[in-house]
Image (cartoon, rainbow, N blue to C red):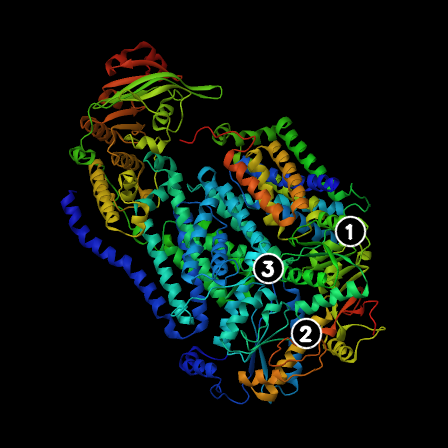
Amino acid sequence: MLESIITYGLAIGAVYAMIGITYNVMYSSSRVFSFTAGMLGMLGGVLGALFITKWGMNTVLAFGLVLACGAVIGIVTEIVTVRPVLKSIEQHLYVLSTLAFALMVQQVTAIEWGTEAQPFPKLIPVEAGLLDQKFWLPMLACTAAIIGLEALYRYTLVGRAFLAIAEDSYAARALGLPETKLRLACYAIAGMIGALAGFTGAQMLLAYFGNQAILNFYGFVPVALGGMGSNRGAIIGGLALGLFQQAASIMFGGIYAAVAVFIVFILILLLRPEGLAGVTVARRV
Amino acid sequence: MSDITASMPAASVNGRKRYQKVVPWLLLGAAGLLLPLLDDAYIGVIAQRAFIYWILSAGLNLLVGFAGQIAIGWVPMLTLGAYTTAVLTAGTVTDPWDPYLALLAGGLVGSLFGVIIGLPALRLRTFYFAMTTLGFTTITTQVALAWKSVTGGGVGTPGPVFPWPFDSTWGFYYFCFILAGIATWLTANIAYSRYGRALIALRDAEVAAEASGISKPKLLVLVFLLAGGLGGIAGGLFASLQSYITPDAFTFEMSVLFFIAILIGGRGSIMGPILGTIILTTLPEFAAPLVQWSTFLYAALLLLIVLLIPGGIAELLDFRGRAALPQHREIAPRPELLGAVLGKPDRSQKMSLHGIQLHFGGVKAIDGIDVEIRAGEVHGLIGPNGSGKTTTLNVISGYYRPTAGELRLNGNALPVETTPERAAHRIARTFQTPRLIGDASVLENVMIGGTIDGQASFVESMLSLPRHHQDERALRDAAMKALAAVGLESLADVRADRLQHSELRFMEIARALMLRPAFLLLDEPAAGLSGEEIRRLGALITAISHEGVAVLLVEHHADLIFDICDTVTVLNLGKVLAAGTPAEIRAHKEVVSAYLGA
Amino acid sequence: MSLSRRHILSGSAAGMAAMATGLATPALASNEPIKIGYLPALTGPSSSTGIAMTRGTELAASVINAAGGINGRPIELVVRDTQSDPTKAVNAVAELAQRARASIIWGPLNSGEALAATPLISRQNIPMLHPCWVDELIDVAKYPMAFRSAPTNTQVGSGANHYVVDVLKLKKVAVISDTTGYGTASVNTYVPMLRAKGADVVYSSHVDAANPDLRPELLRMRNAGAEAIMPWSVNAGFLSRVLNARGAMGWDVPVVGQTTLGSGQTRALLEKPEYWNKVYSNNFKNCCYVDGRLPPNAAEFVERLKRAGIDFNDTLLWWVAAGWDGMHLMADALKAVGTRPRDIVDHWHKVNRRPGVYGTISWSPQQHNGFLDEEVVMCEVNSLRDGAFNLAPGYRA
């Protein structure tokens, strides 16, 4: 029991954490919370199954293609649903445009791919018990994502530019940073991370259109708990969520586990709205 | 441009406008009443569904369309109402209830959970609340499935049957029609009351709303109660229409339908969302092959609306709002009308700041400020950018809580309060960037300022009782007077987002005057104004202070400051650099070097 | 739909009155089609049954029409996809009754939709036939015109319980279902039945079908000492996850349960083909191989399907057969007595051991559940061939 909780919990937690990071990367470059994070995760799994199982592509090639698709979808998201809305006065229209886009993609997937969860192929043809690839692949991916992002932010000029537009977009623009191009790049990166999460997590979650809603919510919880924009908070929140969910699932059964997660989520939000690691916003007047 | 010539045509125009407003409602009502004559039971079922969905959406409309809350997952209210009514009438848990009482119980359960699920909205940002509603939707379905002993689990439970005359097909149709009409009436009453305007203010200009005394938590709780209750009642009716309810009937697609119908219809409108609901309920019935694409089409429609016509159908139908405005407009304030607007302020009022400090982490935005503002005086507050001028205003308004120091009103320390509570002390203000409700008329924007003086309770407004009408008349009168005083009465019915920048500044002053303030805080009101407009602004402010109001004026226009201020305080780096009469300040060496220049 | 709005407006008052009293509907031309309303779920989560049954239903209709229809009048199948949604099912019933003037309604094919649709169809006084299993759907007093051409949940569970307790002779049983109407109703009914047979139900639970990992649940089962797993769900994903978890744990107990355990969809979702061993699902005697051969009716039906080019390898033979049988039950009645509701019901009351491809049906005025107990049997799923299976081992002939 305990091993099951730990392996499965950490693995699914890593997937949630990566979706949380996807939210964060989109948020930090545009101050927009996009409903497309879960969608990217879902597509990572569905497209992966499509390329490898249905089209018979080589695994590594398919992986690369899935990441590329994630990037493209991220870019499309920015152009179609975020950029037009940033210009308008209506602050919360972005929620609606990203929601609409995410719903459209979900429906197309449900209709074209099917409403049944399809199997996701084994990526590495090896047998293993507890150390099965479906557990360590997401964890590996999550670690790679976070290390990659940190390295990007700290050591590259582009990464530091990302941080700049996240901190203060007006100042960044005044300094001559190409805000739009940088935002586009951030959305592409977010798209890749989301797709990565879905691809590595699909051996657990299967290629299923319904994963969008699941990942949207469970990928958001780490962000809410860890504080918006905080990737470290998202990782801790995600892993904690995964473990909690698995433990509750085993102890109470599936239905009550979902209720338990929800109640804990609400309570934490009511007690600490800025998240456990977040900072209160300084000035809005 | 006197008010006499302006008002005469307005009377008959008002009459025709009122007639125009009523006609669509009459048409809709007639269509609903006469539909049974078609004797088509299929159309009847679809129409009943539309009525039921509208009852829920009417409440949700106040939440989404007016308050701007992103309540994407509102179907749980339907679920809860449906199960409550069904279970109580079925007699599985208690003796069978009378169906009407059970329906009422469904509404109460909906109200209760409406507030519970709404609590996060009071403290959290929009996206968080949206996610919470989505999570709650899943939970409700799960619990409905799991709680077999009460809900029948997956097998479900039979729906309630209402007694004669509502037990036949058309009888039940009229029942739904009547309830839909009542729901429309209740929510429209709220929409066109100070509560409705306050909701829109919270949505589009939260900061200004708070400064006008509107308390977000209190108001939202009332709206959650109403929206949840209507959702619950819709649920009971839904259970009856379905004859038998199972958890799989309450789909996420339904939630999306309600939400999108309101947005397609247009925010801040009642007729728009009604049309939106009717369209989205009937659309799938026309296009049989497209039926599985219906959610996709709704989402695509939503995307188009958001990108192209954010105002929805209501914006398309707003012909009046697109009429041309006169090109060269002048703002001609009439300070002689101020007396009627302000009443008689107490000339002994005095506000003083003692040693106020405000630190943000390591940054000392304000580092020990002492200022005194007296009735009948214009007190200027100047200084370089970043010296803490607006921050000081924000502390007085209550947006920030000082790290140290005290704010005293007539010698008594003001407790640490929220911004809406400051409004009760008759502290009004304008903002550095005008905060307006774009969709609403100038008059409605100004009426926001007088919200806290309304006497009618939420329920009285909802039921359109006499006190509500008295309130509306009084508020409207006061707002027109305020607009006349600042010189904008000819633009009263124009949508605020069509105004020029300078007109918006004066509009903010009119809104602030509605509070009949003892203290008026003005944050750079002259920014963006022409020379002549600045002169008129100065005259207006002087007149306001002569009526007995204590005015604190933050400005960069040195001429204006030196023209109209009685005293001036200069801030630099969060500290008071100098204070005194304008003449003293103009000669002050440090002030000149730090700020004014030679 | 051939009737125009004008016809509806002028004829509807008389039509409604006529339907209510059971008198003949206004005279129509003698080769006007007879309309049969059909409410399958062709899209949405529960659509596999609908898609398969439609093949049998439509084939039967075309065969009957090719042979002259109902006394010269062709059958017109008026299809409305319920999208696996009870709300849409109710809308569709209203439309079929009002616009299409259906003489009989076949379906809905899923219990959740049928629960909502049956009261409304009953109020419209239209005879109704459906192949859903939830017991509550048939009630001679409440719904006098509703008939069932499939077993009830009780009969199905009985068959499975009989196999586990009496044939395999196992005592400790774990029962698991998903959270749909069908799943929960099944478990609620079968667990007491098992206990009444003297079995020890050591685990009983409903699990969300979307839950990706069922190992915790199976671990709990094993810890409780279960000797057999009985899953009840029509969701292939869910069932495959049960089998995958059992296989991954290397736990070699028999799995005895819902028909869908043996569907091609479930098989496609298995991680290893051997996970399909020692799995027994509900099936029907008339559609199972015994000593390598199908019973005559079924064999002939399979030939007919192959000739008509209808695919049934990705689904179950008995679903297609149920569609075929259903259409014939309706057509037989229409041919014998015409379209008056009362006459159709009286005719059906007299159906006695009518042989079908799927089931032998018997109805009476007191019993509208037509399937025979003894025709519900278990089959061995890994013997799947042409949509049908071998009878499970251990049955005495």
Q: Report helix, strand or loop for mark 2.
A: helix
Badge 1: residue crowd in 10 Å (few <14, some 14–19, many ≥20) = some
Q: Spot the residue most to the top.
A: B589
- How busy is the neighbourhood of tag 2: few (under 14 within 10 Å), some, or many (20 plus)? many
Instruction: Return the chain for callout 2.
Output: C
Say which mark, if any, is on residue C322. Answer: 2
Res. B148 in view: yes
Residue B176's spot in the image, x, y percent?
40, 63
Task: Tell me the crowding category of disc 3: few under 14, some 14 to 19, or many 20 or more residues within 10 angstroms, Cα based.
Answer: many
SS assignment at label 3: helix
Q: Give whichever of discs 2 and 1 has the lower sequence position.
A: 1
Q: Tell me which amino acid carries mark 3.
A: Gly
**Which label number is shown at residue C225?**
1
Dot 1: what SS?
A: loop
What quarter of the picture does the N terminus of chain B occupy? Answer: top left
Residue B128 picture location, percent across and down: 51, 41
Q: What's the residue at 24%, 30% (across, down)?
A: B537
